[in-house]
């Protein structure tokens, strides 16, 4: 994809998308509602025409190539299953003009059903299936056509949380098994982190950051990427000095800190802030000591999550509380609201932002 542009009338939906997706990659387009991810997926599929830019699939320019002649196939959010047909008829639908014999086609249908874990379900009526089973039928129907690229538009958004988590794992396994390139559209950051080899985070028709899940989480380039993926605390900071090695900072609530250049992927200047994830902070109990640096504060809120407790702590000299998360282990005392505490933190966990 090179400098893809798409306008709807005055509205500029894709503002120069450039990326290369590798063969066999599980690639996700992640971003808030309206950022253009579905539009991008539909232009790859050929359902939407680009205004400019070059889209190549498998070395071929897709300019002027209609959707049905592209080596792509799409699984829709709604699954688009025919309720009055059987599971087999749904899966075999795309083969109706295929010159192979009925027997060969049936073999392909059974193979696809087995692949998605629906062996033995072929004769069932599609309208009698559960949400998760419908999703599998939709996948089987797309895979039977052996596309080079499978496009998935929020395919799990209709499923409940448990089912969705189960399907995510199945989908990863399926993708490894078939070796086809998957491009998934999702607004669910957790889903993108769990499933993807790489993720393109989009805002306002552009890719803001394209990285593997761990890099995106650990070293987000901008505050809004950091905010969109997980939770990030921000504290205002002043740059006291700067060289090739890194930054010398004065951070509200934390004091003087040196941050290496690699922890500032956005190359900030001027007004800056430091960010850190809740799990990189540790709440200190009475008499406890740590090898990390410590900042004093007051517990403002305690939110219990079973395996985890979130604490909002107002560090001395900072107006907005920071959130930190602690795994709950048996026997550990819980700090209450209003208690004074110390928060241990390490400069290694800080990220510097513009
Ligand atoms: P969502 O998660 O809500 O589906 P999205 O990131 O997939 O969001 P798109 O559906 O790609 O967003 O839409 C991007 C922008 O383009 C939106 O502001 C949308 O209103 C606009 N848009 C999409 N399709 C059309 C269309 N056919 N005509 C006019 N505007 C459109």
Image: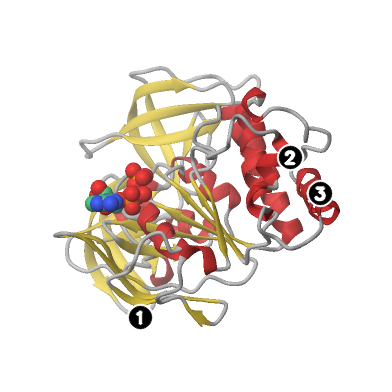
Q: State which mark lies toward you, 3 or 1.
A: 3
The residue closer to the viewer here, 74 or 319, is: 74
Q: Earlier in the sequence, mark 3 or mark 2?
A: 2
Q: CA distance from mark 3 to mark 1?
A: 64 Å
Which quadrant does the N terminus fall into? bottom left
* Disc 3 and disc 1 in contact, CB within 8 angstroms: no
The residue that mark 2 highlights is: 88
* Disc 3 and disc 2 in contact, CB within 8 angstroms: yes
x and y percentages locating residue 191 in the rendered image = 53, 44
Q: Which mark is residue 298?
A: none
Q: Which mark is residue 244?
A: 1
The residue closer to the viewer here, 301 or 89, is: 89
Q: CA distance from mark 2 to mark 1?
A: 62 Å
**Vertically, is 351 above or below 281?**
below
Which quadrant does the C terminus fall into? bottom left
Q: How is the image coloured?
A: secondary structure
* Disc 2 and disc 1 in contact, CB within 8 angstroms: no
The residue that mark 3 highlights is: 106
Q: State which mark lies toward you, 2 or 1.
A: 2
| Name of the residue lying farthest toward the left | 10
| Residue 241 in sight | yes
The residue closer to the viewer here, 93 or 288, is: 93
In-image side of 203 versus 54 (left or right):
left
x and y percentages locating residue 7 in the rendered image = 23, 63
x and y percentages locating residue 45 in the rendered image = 47, 61
In-image side of 126 versus 262 (left or right):
right
| Residue 291 in sight | no
Q: Quadrant location of residue 205?
A: bottom left
Q: Badge 3, how many Cα within 10 Å: few under 14, some, many 20+?
A: some
**Vertically, is 185 above or below 259?**
above
In-image side of 47 versus 215 (left or right):
left
The residue that appears at 49% across and 74% down in the rendered structure is 20
């Amino acid at each position: 994809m090179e400098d893809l542009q798409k306008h709807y009338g005055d509205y500029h939906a894709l503002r120069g998308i450039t990326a290369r997706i590798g063969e066999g990659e599980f690639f996700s387009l992640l971003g808030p509602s309206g950022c253009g991810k579905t539009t991008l997926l539909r232009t790859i599929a050929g359902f939407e025409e680009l205004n400019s830019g070059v889209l190549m699939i498998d070395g071929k320019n897709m300019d002027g190539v209609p959707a049905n002649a592209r080596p792509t196939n799409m699984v829709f959010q709604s699954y688009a299953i025919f309720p009055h047909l059987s599971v087999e008829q749904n899966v075999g639908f795309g083969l109706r003009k295929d010159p192979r014999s009925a027997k060969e086609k049936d073999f392909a249908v059974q193979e696809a059903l087995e692949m998605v874990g629906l062996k033995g379900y072929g004769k069932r009526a599609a309208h009698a299936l559960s949400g998760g089973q419908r999703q599998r039928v939709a996948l089987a129907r797309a895979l039977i056509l052996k596309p080079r690229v499978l496009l998935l538009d929020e395919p799990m958004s209709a499923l409940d949380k448990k089912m969705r988590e189960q399907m995510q794992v199945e989908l990863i396994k399926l993708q490894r098994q078939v070796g086809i390139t998957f491009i998934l559209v999702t607004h669910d950051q957790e889903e993108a982190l769990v499933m993807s080899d790489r993720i393109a985070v989009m805002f306002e028709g552009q890719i803001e950051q394209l990285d593997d899940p761990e890099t995106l989480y650990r070293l987000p380039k901008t505050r809004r990427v950091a905010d969109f993926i997980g939770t990030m605390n921000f504290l205002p900071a002043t740059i006291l000095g700067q060289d090739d090695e890194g930054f010398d900072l004065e951070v509200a609530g934390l004091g003087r800190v040196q941050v290496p250049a690699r922890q500032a992927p956005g190359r900030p200047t001027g007004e800056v802030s430091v960010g850190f994830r809740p799990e990189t902070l540790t709440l200190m109990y009475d008499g406890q000591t740590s090898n990390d640096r410590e900042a004093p504060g007051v517990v403002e809120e305690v939110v219990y999550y079973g395996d985890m407790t979130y604490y909002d702590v107002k560090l001395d000299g900072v107006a907005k509380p920071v959130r930190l998360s602690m795994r709950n282990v048996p026997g550990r005392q819980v700090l209450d609201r209003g208690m004074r505490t110390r928060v241990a933190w390490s400069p290694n966990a800080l990220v510097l932002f513009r």
